[in-house]
Image: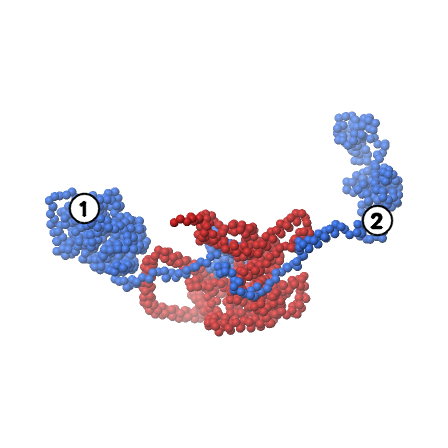
Amino acid sequence: DISFGYLTSSSRFESFPIQSRQKQKKLLHTGMSKFTLILTSLNLQVLDKCKIFSSVSLLVFITFSVRSQDIRNTVGNIPMEWYKDYPHIGYDLDGKKLFKPIRNKDELDEFLDKMENPDYWRTVQDKMTGADIRLSDEQVDLVHRLQQGKFGDVNFNEYEPAIDFFSNEVMIHPVTNRPQDKRSFIPSLIEKEKVGKLVHAIKMGWIKPRRPKETTPQYYDLWAKEDPNSILGRHKMHVPAPKMKLPGHEESYNPPPEYLMSEEERLAWEQQDPEDRKLSFLPQKFACLRAVPAYSRFIHERFERCLDLYLCPRQRKMRVNVNPEDLIPKLPKPKDLQPFPTTQSLVYRGHSSLVRSISVSPSGQWLVSGSDDCTVRFWEVSTARCLKTVEVGGAVKGVAWNPNPSICLVAVSYDDTVVLLNPGLGDRLVCTASDQLISSYEEPEEVKDQLVQWAVAEGEGHEQGHRLILKHPKAVRQVTWHGKGDYLACVMPDNGSSLQVVIHQVSKRRTQNPFRKNKGLVQCVSFHPIRPYFFVATQRYVRVYNLIKQELTKKLMANCKWISSMAIHPGGDNVICGSYDCRLAWFDLDLSTKPYKVLRHHKKALRSVAYHRHYPLFASGSDDGSVIVCHGMVYNDLLQNPLIVPVKVLKGHTITHDLGVLDVTFHPTQPWVFSSGSDGTVRLFT
Amino acid sequence: MGGLQKKKYESGSATNYISRNKARKKLSLSLADFRRLCILKGIYPHEPKHKKKVNKGSTAPRTFYLLKDIRFLLHEPIVGKFREYKIFVRKLRKAYGKAEWSGVQRMKENKPAYKLDHIIKERYPTFIDAVRDVDDALSMCFLFSTFARTGKCHVQTIQLCRRLGVEWMNYIIASRSLRKVFLSIKGIYYQAEVLGQTITWIIPYQFAHDHPTDVDYRVMATFTELYTTLLGFVNFRLYQTLNLVYPPKLDGQGEFSLKSECEEDYALESESYSEKLAALSASLARTVPSVEDEEAELDHFPAEGEDLEKMETREKMELEQNKQKKLFEGLKFFLNREVPRESLAFVIRCFGGEVSWDKSLCIGSTYDETDETITHHIVDRPTIDKQYINRYYIQPQWVYDCVNGKILLPVEEYFLGVTLPPHLSPFVEESEGDYVPPEKLKLLALQKGEKPQAEEDEEEEEEEDDEDDEEEDDQSEDEDEAEDEASLAEMEEKRAQGKSLSVKVTPGKVKPENRMRTEQEEKAEEKRLAIMMMKKREKYLYDKIMFGKKRHVREANKLAAKRKAHDDANKPDKKKKKKKC
């Protein structure tokens, strides 16, 4: 049952009777929260009764009174399994134990009950009392409804129309009877204060009036008055940004086929770093304009351009557009510098191994060549006929024809021996004279200990032409005659001792060692053609000694790693040095001790150099198999520097064992040059 | 002696340069603001000659600015604006934090703004300077105008860029100063000659952009800010030179309004108006009579003045240009809906043609497809269903090739479904020794007016080849005797001719060749010898130059060889096709 009531101002609860049972039920279902709803549904007659129009605040109390006939268990809302082990299940209002009904049904009974009792399905056990209760029809219905999520009451309509009391429609009567406030009649002080503040702020300029908003920029003639004076000075220094490179054919959407990349090119392109690529894109061909897609790197490229514009230092670079032809020095034409050897005219074949050294007789009629096949051959220059072959006991390192035309002697060096040969060619008178010269030697009274053993060749050797045999303590590499033909210098390169160069005097069969000290590995030596000077080339320097004063006069620095050969100009003031590092250095002795000119004409190491005796020519032979003939004019006027012009590259020798030309020498009178090579031939270029 | 010892790095180049960080501190700006300032003012770093001296002995990589430049920046009023903006942002954040929405509103309305007018004037003191530098501005504006209205930058910027781009294009049309167009895989390059300055810009193809993540859009936006200002002023002045109204107005308003009645697709009147402008077509075509007359007069006066002064070559050039300007005059084009409308409309109108398109494609079409007077219908699909007889159906490349070739090219090679001839870059000017693609040679011949000959020759050659082939075939197969005889006779004649020629010619030619050769050899040897005598430094330079030249030649040869291989590979196919035909 529900008692309905209201609290009066004297906090007395007065209940009012409720007419219909239906309304009771409605109240039961909706509860307190649906207060207004209750009020509406209660109808006005109820409201009249409780006089809610007065200033009494209305409260509705709903009390549920449990039926008195119920056996009330007083344990409250506890888990009932706590009483599982007891015979009672709780206590009634009087504090007496409530005993559980006797339950002796086992499973079978339960089953039978289930099968037989038609009300079994609506029988539930009361948790509080433990008794079985059979649900009435109404209760079952209620359960069903609740299970479906409906209201328990069948008759309750949850969608009843709501009545808006405080609606937008203005009614003629007030909803409440309250008189209006005073503040609704008088202006607000707070607002006044606020407005005052704003007015003050505006007056003080703290709040600025809204500017009319400019949505689009206004353009005008910015350059209407172009005043040259207003241009800043710094603008002259301004470097305008270079324009972007214009696209070529390969960027076309439909380029000519040759601009498309082949498969390998494409792969190479993909493997390259993006910075290294020549093209920043892959050329592509599309059949029609419609098929051209968007370029994915477009924004990137614009962005990179932006970066370039503001991050790259700009500089004006003067690009010198050099015509390469202008760089080539203007030299006199080789044609004007003739004569010089131009063509290979004769090849002297006969040697089976590389020809280390050659020499021409002072008359220019004979040529002698020494080879690694242990022979010395004498050739007739004009016919290339081998006149004589002399076998010696080792690979011939050097041959030198005596420059004195009245003596016919050839110095040949092999191993540690130097042999003076009389080839017996040419003028018989000269031959016999030279033989006599050697045989007329008389032993001096006091015999000194010589550095070198002098021996006269006899027997078979004599028949072959051997005249004098000089046994040296070490291997002799080079022999060279003095211009007069009496002195002979031999080089025995040895890093350790001071005995590297010896000078022999043939007429007196005397030998002397000019140097006391070892100044380095001697490469080659040479006599000055006129003056008593002696040139000694070590690895890096050429030392010039005065033989009379016995002192060092000059030390030429060749600026190269390893001098291989040296030649003295017949005038005596110029020296050329060939080196193994492909250079040829020309020294002007009057100018400086440094090279006047260094020529790097050859691709490989220079093996020998030579001056012509009369013509202004010099030649150099190199391992690259070529002989380069240069015009090297030395003027009598000391102020004028020598003129050096390469005039001809002569090629003929084949390269064997990485060696090309081993020796070059000029014909004494003609502008011809002989060269001997590692291919076992001697060639004449005329 | 005496005197104080000089301290290091207190004079000379060390004091002329300032590192970026120091410069930033001196201006008391954040890096972003400094960057923005440099972009706007056109200050770029300098590379000192002796970096170590400037860097006070350190070799660390640093960016250096000229101290003068930074001092110059100190006086810039915009720096103050930057600071104001910073303060504004701070206040705004605070207001947000306190949820003072009215304050936020008010502050937003009073957002500090700056103008770049004085910077433009300062950077480009003369108008010509500005025109010269407008390349990048155009490319950037056209790029920004293709951006979507959401996301990467303000809508106003995009709209402004679009507006300026359209203004520029309208000017180019009105002044007829477009010279070259190039369809590249990146976009479409245009080159115009404005007031004697060659200006090149690129417009991307109309697609949505795939915005890269590694691009700093703030930098781009700053550049765009500068460029829009520059372009606006340049446009204003250019419009003034042609006596056009700025902002551009369409002429013949009456008709325009009539037209616009039927096109109610646009919500705003102004919007539809700007779209009309952007259509570049019909609307302006109607303005042409009045505007162009003026323009023509304007054009003629200076031209005559120049003619009096300048050389004949100049005159010729001008004549050629004038001819080029009227390239499409009298031609009526219709664009199918799949072709790039804007680009084609722009190009065609630049050379005096009339252009229209389907009404549903875009606003501003002037005539329908059914118009009988249309001469060229531009289509970019293999076939079209309904064809009208009295017009050419051609692919869009024809228009661009005509512009670049400065003549109306024969349309046969550009018909629908035909394999197009290669599209060549008009920007390449081959010097001697460069590789010239055969298509270019053909074009040059066409320009000289040798068109029929060249073609005939080619055809003849081809025919001859074909004949030869046929003859060979004939030899192998047995066919009609009469034909055989005829062909054999021909062949014999040819052979006889060939033989007699060869017999006569060879002995005569040998000797002079030899002499020439010996001379050449001599010269070559002289040169070789002279090269041997070169100084080391000169030799190095010479070698470098020669290496470059050789590489150039090698590349040219490579291209030529590739072309030859391609032609050889394709020849049999062509012949087969011909035979089939």
Q: Amino acid at mark 1?
A: Gln
How busy is the neighbourhood of tag 2: few (under 14 within 10 Å), some, or many (20 plus)? few
Image x and y of residue B565, in percent? 44, 60
What residue type is disc 2 on?
A: Pro
- The residue at the point 52 percent across, 64 percent down is A228
- Give the CA distance from mark 2 to mark 1: 152 Å
| Res B371 → quadrant | bottom right
Could you tell whether A448 is left or right of A542 in the image?
A: left
Q: Residue at the location (59% across, 70% down)?
A: B291
Callouts 2 and 1 close, C-beta under 8 Å: no
Toward the viewer: A591 or A277?
A591
Q: Position of residue B175 (x, y in %)?
A: 56, 68
Q: Can you give x and y, in whole percent of width and height, for residue B326 in the image? A: 54, 70
Query: What color does chain A have in the rendering?
Result: blue
Query: Is residue A250 or residue A472 the one in the foreground?
Result: A472
Query: Dot 2 corresponds to which residue?
Result: A179
Foreground label between 2 and 1: 2
**Tag of residue A512:** 1
Q: Earlier in the sequence, mark 2 or mark 1?
A: 2
* Residue B581 vertical placement versus A525 (above, below): below
Q: Secondary structure at mark 1?
A: strand
Q: Which chain is assigned red?
A: B
Q: Is residue A595 left or right of residue B298?
A: left
Marked residue chain, label 2 = A
Q: Look at the image and tell me in which quarter the N terminus of chain A lies.
A: top right
Residue A669, given in percent of the width and then of the height, sits at 21, 59
Numbered disc 2: secondary structure? loop
Q: Left of B28 or right of it: where is A636? A: left
